[in-house]
Every structure is written in structure tokens, then in C-alpha cells.
């Protein structure tokens, strides 16, 4: 079953408010990011394309349109559930687990980006 | 019985007693490689440190196996490590007939060098949850031996000392908060005097790439040098707070120059790798400035951890062509003391060993367009191609995997030739303005998407060339359809061994490049080949196993045999002459 793009997009839209809290928490634990940095960083946390470039493009080449270290993702026949699970849990020796890095809304934005890829 | 007879009988009795009370091999095994062996040009019976000796020649002085009889080389024994996820990427060590090596998850094995029989094995408990979050994991690339210990780093940020005799832990020191920075240790440590030195992973991960020195006996940290903003001078080369997440790990072992009491180490690229600043990189973008001491060779005082001098090979590295290659080839040439260091960009730098002043720079590979050239007198980049947001046209050469990969070449003091693998490939690249990562956290820090493509002059490929290490003058070259990614070994038997990506080990005549022998190990190679002596017999040990981050690119580039090649298995294959 596919998570609708509308749902993923909705999660992406509400994320700026959610993500500030999460980023703050990480910053506090690290001890020193400036408030300005947090404000600047938050809105982009739900940009699926930027998140993909920062984290996933290292292995999924050409923004996910071409196989590299990881498989091609555009027009993937894998289910949404599979992709979400793989992002969360990774695959030992092949892909890192991002389940504790990104929340459901961010993973939804990544999924929306992947589903929107042309070839 | 005369006095002389009594003396002879007494000596014989002592000899017999020593045979009875001292078990063969193990009890006699030294627990510290002799200084003379570490400082020599050639590794002899032992392979005591990652690069062979501190000279870093990856050269064995053994010549039982030579151009005349290498055709009789055959498998003597094999060893199969557990959990060989991403193959076997390490370089074994050998001391007094015992071979030691590490596999993925920092598992360590001590084996009888003549038979392969296991003497002991060690498997640390790792933070598996953390391992699952890492990209550059769970492989391990090597170990160090000294002070009666064997040292191995872990991907969850620890350095562990094991008793060389029985593999029991002596100490286990947490050096990195790997949960915070995600990276740990995959590279081999280096023993220097009473300490062991190790560098953290990290280029595109948001950390500050420390290099640590730890007391060999106690496991106490002696010093820590931040390769990113490790001095006030360096901090001033990072705009804003970008130094906080600058990357720059020293993830491969460097070496030690006892003549000047200097540790030489190479550092990784700055993060994010690729930025959108273009020509205005000194003032804008995510990390404005030179970004010291990333993509640099640094010289540290081992007693204090203080920086003595450095050379930044690529100021503001905008291409991920880092200096992490750990091989520093120490040469005396024409009255000068030199050191040769290969940079990932495909250029080889030659330095004065006393101050890191550039003596020459020469290109090993043909397809380079990130700069027009590098000034061989000063090391200055000429016509650098800084990237702006959007599609990079024409494609960048070399590709992100580099013109030179992290494994080592070899140098033969017998004929003065340097043997190095080069890679010819490029990549299409689109630079994107990503969200700045301002705190160390569990995510990568990239600023581009990319795709490997063949270079303008032909298919993607690799080559081994034999060159003068100072001038770069080429004597011979062998080409490969698929770039070999393992280390190279030269020997006094006038041989050069190259374990290739398809799975074949080749032996060449060191003077001519003529292939004299080859054997198929059945899986690609990505570790370090060595030679050693056990029971009076010379052996060649080759780790086999495929699955590194560079090797993972081969499926999309070349298809088979890499599409079907397992990335979760491996073996140590040991060769000797047929009896």
C-alpha cells in the first residue's frame, strides 16, 4: 500500500513547527547551537530533496535516479511500507538506519521526494 | 672429563633445558617489534606495522619467492573470519612466525603463520545499534603491535589493547563519543615509542576528526589533536561556526619519522563535501575559508601532540579529494630527506621531510580537471574549478572515488621504483544548497548529487604504474578493466604483487611489468597484501573479500562480475612455494 503523497506532503508542511522542538533538544544536548542557527535550520528539515542530497545522494546516484552504492529509487516497485522501513532500520553493511535521525514527517518528505522522481 | 668437555656438556644441558622449558614459537615470540625493524627500509621476517616499516615502502626484504620460482606459488592455507560484512579490508601483521589480522566488527585473529592454525581469536562486543546507523562500517582496516599488546580500534569509538600472547583484553579506552558524531575508528593504529596513535573517521560526517595518542601500557589518553580548527590559526580559516562540523578525520594510519621525531598523518575532506560557494569560497558558502587542517598532511610532535608543520594539499577542498591516504614514503635522494604522499585527487606530492616544503608534485592519473595543474615548486593550485549551485559541466574528474584510493602502493629500494594504482573515472554532479549542519549529529553532510561516468579518453579503468617516486617518470604500466582497490606489495625477489578487483592476484617482474604468475581467489580484494617468514619459509598473505564504499560503485559502473559478487564474506589466503 502507498502512503498518499498528500499525507506525506501534509506531514511535510506541519513539520517546521515540530522540527524546531526536536532540533532544540539535540542542540541543548550538544550544548551550543545558536538560536539563529536553529531558526535557519528548521524550515529546510522537511525539504525532501535537500534531505536526500545531504544524506542519501552519497549512495543513490543522480538524486536517486541511478544505481550507485545503493539501488536506483525512481520508479521503484517497492511498497511505501518497505521504503519507510528501510529508511528507519537500514541494512547492515549497506545502508545506515535513519529511524532515530528523522521522524515520521521527515521520512514522509523523503518518500514524497522519491515517489516524485522522474527517470 | 676435561674442563673443555665439562663446558660442552654443560652447554648442551642448558640447551636441552631451554628446549624443555620454553615451548616452541609462542613463549619465544617477542612482544615488541625491535626499533631497528621498524626503522628499516624492508620488512624482513616480520611485518611489524601497517605500512611494513616506518619508511612505508610496503616492501619485503625476503627473496625466497622470486622471479625464477614464483610460478610455483600455491595456496598454503586459508582462514575464514566470522561476520565478514563488507569483506576483509585489513592489512595483516606478522611477528616471529605468528600472523595477526582483523576483520569486520574489529574481530582479531592470531594464527600460526606456517599452518594457519588458530592460536587465539577475539571479538569485542560493539554497540550494534550505533553500527546500524553508520555508513562507513563495520569494516576494520588494521591493527598495531607494541608494548606486548595488539591494538585495534572500533567503530563505536574505542581503542582496545589485547595481550599479544593470549588475546585477552588489557585495556579498553573510549576515545570518541560515537553516538554523537556517529563515526568511530576503522583505520589501523600506529605504535610510536611508548604510545599508540589512532585517527577518527570523518569527512562528510559532522565531526572534528581528532587524532589521539594513548599510553600503551595504561590505556590513558595522552593527547588529542583536532584536525579541524586544532589551533587558533586553523580556526580562523573557517567562517562562522562552520569549524564545529568540519569533518577532516585522519582515518588512515600515517607513519613516524624517528630522525626528526615526527608523526606524519593525512587528513580527510571538509564537510559538507561539495559546497555552492563557487569562486567566492573564501567569503561565502557553508564553510568559507581554507578549512585547516582538512585535506592536509600534518606533522605532529608525538611527545606533546602539538603541530610542528603542515601542508594543505588542497586549500578549501571543494571536491572530496582528501589527503587521508596514510602512506608516507620516506626517501633519501640527492642528499635530501624526502617524503612522498599520494593525494586522492590523483596527484602525488613530494615534500622535504624537515618542514613539509613542497619539492615536487606530479600526476599519477590522466583524467584530472578539478584544477588545470598544481605548481610543482610550491604546490599551489592553478586554475581551480570551484563549484556553484547547479549542474557541473563538464563532468568532474576524477570521480568522488578519487584518482587514487586509500590503499597503499609500494616502493622497491632495490630498483628505486614506486608502484601505485591509479583510477580513471569522472562523474556528473549537481551541487545543491543544502541545510547547514551546525551540530555534530547522526547524519551525513553532503551538498551534491552525482553519478559516475567514463572519462573523456575511454572507459572507466585502473592501472598500476612503476615510476620514479620523486619525478613521476614512468617506466612501465599495466592496465586493468576494473580498478584494483587493494594494496600493492614489492619484494626483494624482484616481484610486485597486485591483488585485483575481480579476484585475481598477479605477480609481475618488478623491473619490466611482465606478468609471471596469477591465481584467482574467487572474490575481489580490498585489503593489504604482506609477506613474512615462518619456520624458515616465506609466505605471501592476501586478504580477499569485497564490499567497500568505492567497491560498491562497481556494480553500476561495470555490472558483472560485481553484481553477483558477495559483499558479506571473505578469507585470508596465504601462498607459499610448492615443496
Image (cartoon, rainbow, N blue to C red):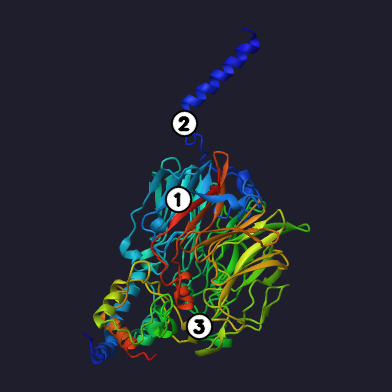
Residue B275's label in the rendered image is: 3
Q: Is mark 2 on a helix, strand or loop?
A: loop
Tell me, for residue B23, which label it has, or none: 2
CB of mark 1 within 8 Å of CB of mark 3? Answer: no
Instruction: Categorize mark 2 by other alpha carbons within 10 Å: few (<14), some (14-19), many (20+).
Output: few
Cα separation, mark 1 vs mark 3, equals 46 Å
Give the structural element (helix, strand or loop) at label 3.
loop
**Marks 3/2: CA–CA distance:** 61 Å
Name the front one of labels 1 and 3: 1
Which residue is more in the foreground, B56 or B175?
Answer: B56
Q: Can residue B272 be seen in this view?
A: no
The disc, 3 or 2, on the residue closer to the chain's N-terminal end is 2
Give x and y (percent) for residue B344.
57, 71
- Circle 1 SS class: strand
The chain letter under disc 2 is B
Residue B78, numbered circle:
1
* Residue B386 found in image quarter: bottom right
Tag 2–tag 1 contact (CB < 8 Å): no
For marks 1 and 3, the one nearer the N-term is 1
Amino acid at each position: 500500500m502507498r502512503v498518499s503523497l498528500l499525507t506525506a506532503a501534509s506531514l511535510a508542511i506541519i513539520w517546521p513547527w515540530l522540527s524546531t522542538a526536536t532540533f532544540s533538544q539535540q542542540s541543548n544536548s550538544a550544548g551550543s547551537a545558536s538560536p539563529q542557527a536553529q531558526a535557519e535550520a528548521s524550515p529546510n528539515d522537511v525539504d525532501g530533496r535537500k534531505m536526500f542530497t545531504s544524506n542519501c545522494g552519497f549512495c543513490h546516484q543522480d538524486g536517486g535516479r541511478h544505481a550507485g552504492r545503493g539501488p536506483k529509487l525512481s520508479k521503484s516497485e517497492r511498497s511505501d511500507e518497505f521504503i519507510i522501513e528501510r529508511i528507519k532500520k537500514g541494512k547492515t553493511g549497506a545502508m545506515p538506519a535513519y529511524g532515530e535521525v528523522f521522524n515520521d514527517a521527515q521520512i514522509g518528505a523523503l518518500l514524497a521526494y522519491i515517489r516524485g522522481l522522474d527517470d | 672429563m676435561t674442563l673443555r668437555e665439562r663446558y660442552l656438556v654443560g652447554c648442551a644441558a642448558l640447551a636441552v633445558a631451554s628446549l624443555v622449558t620454553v615451548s616452541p614459537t609462542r613463549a619465544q615470540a617477542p612482544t615488541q617489534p625491535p626499533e631497528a625493524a621498524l626503522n628499516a627500509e624492508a620488512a624482513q621476517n616480520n611485518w611489524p606495522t601497517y605500512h611494513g616499516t616506518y619508511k612505508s615502502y610496503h616492501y619485503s626484504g625476503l627473496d625466497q619467492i622470486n622471479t625464477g620460482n614464483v610460478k610455483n606459488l600455491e595456496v598454503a592455507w586459508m582462514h575464514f573470519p566470522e561476520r565478514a560484512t563488507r569483506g576483509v579490508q585489513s592489512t595483516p601483521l606478522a611477528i616471529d612466525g605468528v600472523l595477526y589480522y582483523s576483520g569486520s566488527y574489529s574481530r582479531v585473529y592470531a594464527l600460526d603463520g606456517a599452518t594457519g592454525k588458530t592460536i587465539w581469536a577475539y571479538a569485542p562486543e560493539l554497540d550494534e545499534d550505533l553500527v546500524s546507523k553508520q555508513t562507513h562500517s563495520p569494516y576494520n582496516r588494521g591493527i598495531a603491535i607494541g608494548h606486548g599488546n595488539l591494538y585495534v580500534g572500533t567503530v563505536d569509538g574505542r581503542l582496545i589493547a589485547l595481550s599479544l600472547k593470549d588475546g585477552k583484553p588489557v585495556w579498553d579506552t573510549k576515545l570518541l563519543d560515537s553516538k554523537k558524531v556517529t563515526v568511530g575508528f576503522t583505520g589501523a593504529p600506529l605504535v610510536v615509542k611508548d604510545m599508540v596513535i589512532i585517527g577518527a573517521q570523518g569527512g562528510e560526517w559532522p565531526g572534528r576528526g581528532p587524532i589521539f595518542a594513548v599510553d600503551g601500557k595504561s590505556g590513558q589518553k595522552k593527547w588529542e589533536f583536532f584536525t579541524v580548527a586544532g589551533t587558533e590559526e586553523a580556526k580562523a580559516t573557517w567562517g562562522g561556526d562552520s569549524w564545529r562540523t568540519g569533518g577532516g578525520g585522519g582515518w588512515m594510519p600515517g607513519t613516524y619519522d624517528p630522525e626528526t621525531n615526527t608523526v606524519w598523518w593525512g587528513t580527510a575532506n571538509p564537510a559538507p563535501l561539495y559546497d555552492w560557494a563557487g569562486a567566492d569560497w573564501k567569503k561565502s558558502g557553508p564553510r568559507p575559508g581554507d578549512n585547516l587542517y582538512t585535506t592536509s598532511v600534518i606533522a605532529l610532535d608525538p611527545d606533546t601532540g602539538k603541530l610542528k608543520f603542515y601542508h594543505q594539499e588542497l586549500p578549501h577542498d571543494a571536491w572530496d579529494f582528501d589527503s587521508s591516504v596514510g602512506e608516507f614514503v620516506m626517501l633519501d635522494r640527492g642528499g635530501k630527506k624526502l617524503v612522498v604522499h599520494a593525494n586522492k585527487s590523483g596527484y602525488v606530492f613530494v615534500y622535504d621531510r624537515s618542514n613539509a616544503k613542497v619539492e615536487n608534485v606530479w600526476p599519477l592519473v590522466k583524467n584530472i580537471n578539478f584544477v588545470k595543474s598544481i605548481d610543482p615548486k610550491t604546490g599551489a593550485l592553478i586554475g581551480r574549478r570551484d563549484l556553484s549551485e547547479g549542474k557541473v559541466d563538464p563532468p568532474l574528474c576524477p570521480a568522488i572515488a578519487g584518482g587514487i584510493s586509500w590503499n597503499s602502493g609500494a616502493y622497491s629500494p632495490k630498483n628505486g621504483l614506486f608502484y601505485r594504482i591509479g583510477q580513471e573515472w569522472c562523474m556528473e554532479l549537481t551541487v545543491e544548497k543544502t541545510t547547514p549542519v551546525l551540530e555534530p549529529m547522526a547524519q551525513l553532510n553532503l551538498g551534491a548529487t552525482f553519478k559516475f561516468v567514463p572519462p573523456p579518453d575511454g572507459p572507466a579503468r585502473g592501472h598500476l604504474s612503476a615510476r620514479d617516486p620523486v619525478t613521476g617518470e614512468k617506466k612501465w604500466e599495466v592496465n586493468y578493466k576494473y580498478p584494483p582497490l587493494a594494496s600493492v606489495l614489492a619484494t626483494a625477489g624482484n616481484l610486485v604483487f597486485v591483488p585485483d578487483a575481480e579476484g585475481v592476484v598477479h605477480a609481475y617482474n618488478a623491473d619490466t611489468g611482465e606478468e609471471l604468475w596469477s591465481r584467482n581467489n574467487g572474490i575481489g580484494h580490498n585489503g593489504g597484501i604482506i609477506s613474512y617468514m615462518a619456520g624458515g619459509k616465506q609466505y605471501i598473505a592476501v586478504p580477499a573479500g569485497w564490499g567497500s564504499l568505492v567497491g560498491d560503485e562497481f556494480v553500476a559502473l561495470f555490472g558483472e562480475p560485481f553484481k553477483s559478487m558477495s559483499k558479506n564474506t571473505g578469507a585470508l589466503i596465504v601462498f607459499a612455494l610448492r615443496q
